[in-house]
Amino acid sequence: MKTSYDKSTDSLYIEVRPLPSSRTVEIEEDVMVDYRADGHPVGYDIQHASTKADFIARVVLDHSPAAAE
């Protein structure tokens, strides 16, 4: 998992797989998910990230190595 944060726009991108996406879906206000063709997520684009700590924690926990076991 790789993250990049832009402080000037308060936007965070969480890359869960280094693969190209085939579609993007807004799953809640200011949160977009990039999906592969097979439907698996490859990344999350989170606007106003400083206000979305609960969502960010869920994403990190859902995609941690321990969650894959």
Image (cartoon, helix red, strand yellow):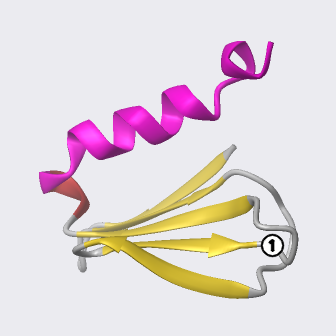
Q: Secondary structure at mark 1?
A: loop
Q: Which residue is mark 1?
A: 36
Span colored in magenta: 51-69
> Is the residue marked by circle 1 packed among few (<14), some (14-19), or many (20+) residues within 10 Å?
some
Residue at image x 36%, y 44%? 56
Q: Is residue 28 left or right of residue 63?
A: left
Q: Is residue 3 above or below residue 26?
A: above
At 24% from the left and 77% from the top, the residue drawn is: 8
41 displayed left or right of 11: right
- Where residue 68 sits, quadrant-wise, is top right
Q: Amino acid at mark 1?
A: Arg
Where does residue 13 sit, x and y in percent of width and height? 50, 65
* 8, above or below 51, in the image: below
Tell me if residue 51 comes above or below residue 7 in the rendering: above
In the image: residue 8, left or right of residue 57: left
Residue 24: where, in percent of width, then height?
58, 84
Which percent across, then down, holds residue 47? Answer: 28, 73
Residue at 72% in and 63% down:
42
Magenta stretch, overall SS? helix
- Check the picture and name the quadrant holding the N terminus: top right
